[in-house]
Image: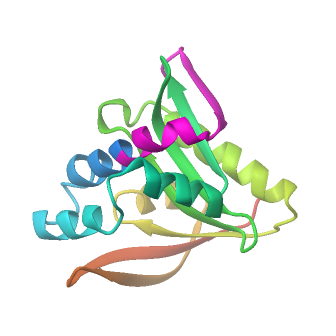
Amino acid sequence: MLERTRFREALPRDAADQAEVFHHAVMEGASSHYSLAQREAWAAALPRTAEAWMARQALYPTLVAECDGHCIGFCERDATEGRIETLYVWPSVARQGIGSQLLALTLAALREAGHESITIDASLVLAPSLLARGWSQVAEDWVERHGERLPRVRLHYIPQ
């Protein structure tokens, strides 16, 4: 992990960076698992604007990974449902432990909120690493975005 990385709750100033992290994680990071048409539809599902991501921050408590003043990854949680809504990391810093730390901190926050089990609808990119970390597959699923079917995997986790 980048030693200058710190983890904290999202602030409105992170929203523009979140939009970029999301866009690049989908368009570049998911390229080996989804077609260009699927990634374009996925990326278009959420506006690439700070305003849209500020609105999401109001809906979902969000942890960010910050490096040199910029959000380089984030994880949104639905504290009411005990669900991880999203987990995205900037592609150039992926596979360096940033996503793992965001996930661990988010799981701790959901446990602290009283959830005994946690769910996520994981992309085909994320699902294998979660399964390797003790998550259980509940079902294969898909979501439609702009006429494209995006396969995903519903996973369940019971923290120890």
- For residue 8, side relative to residue 131 (left or right): right
Corner quadrant of residue 3: top right
Coordinates of residue 116 in the picture (x, y in percent): 82, 68
Coordinates of residue 158 in the picture (x, y in percent): 74, 66
Name which residue lies at 51% across and 34% down: 98
Residue closest to the far left: 36
The count of marks equals 0
Name which residue lies at 69% across and 43% down: 105
Q: Nearer the viewer, residue 16 or 71?
A: 16
Coordinates of residue 1 in the picture (x, y in percent): 50, 24
The answer to whether one can see residue 131 in this image is: yes
The C terminus, quarter of image: bottom right
Residue 98 belongs to the span the image colors magenta: no
Taking 69 as reference, is 31 above or below it?
A: below
Corner quadrant of residue 140: bottom left
Name which residue lies at 41% across and 84% down: 141
The answer to whether one can see residue 133 in this image is: no
Taking 15 as reference, is 96 above or below it?
A: above
Q: Nearer the viewer, residue 68 or 126?
A: 68
Residue numbers of the magenta segment: 1-19
Name which residue lies at 44% across and 58% down: 52
Residue closest to the far front: 51
Coordinates of residue 39 in the picture (x, y in percent): 21, 63
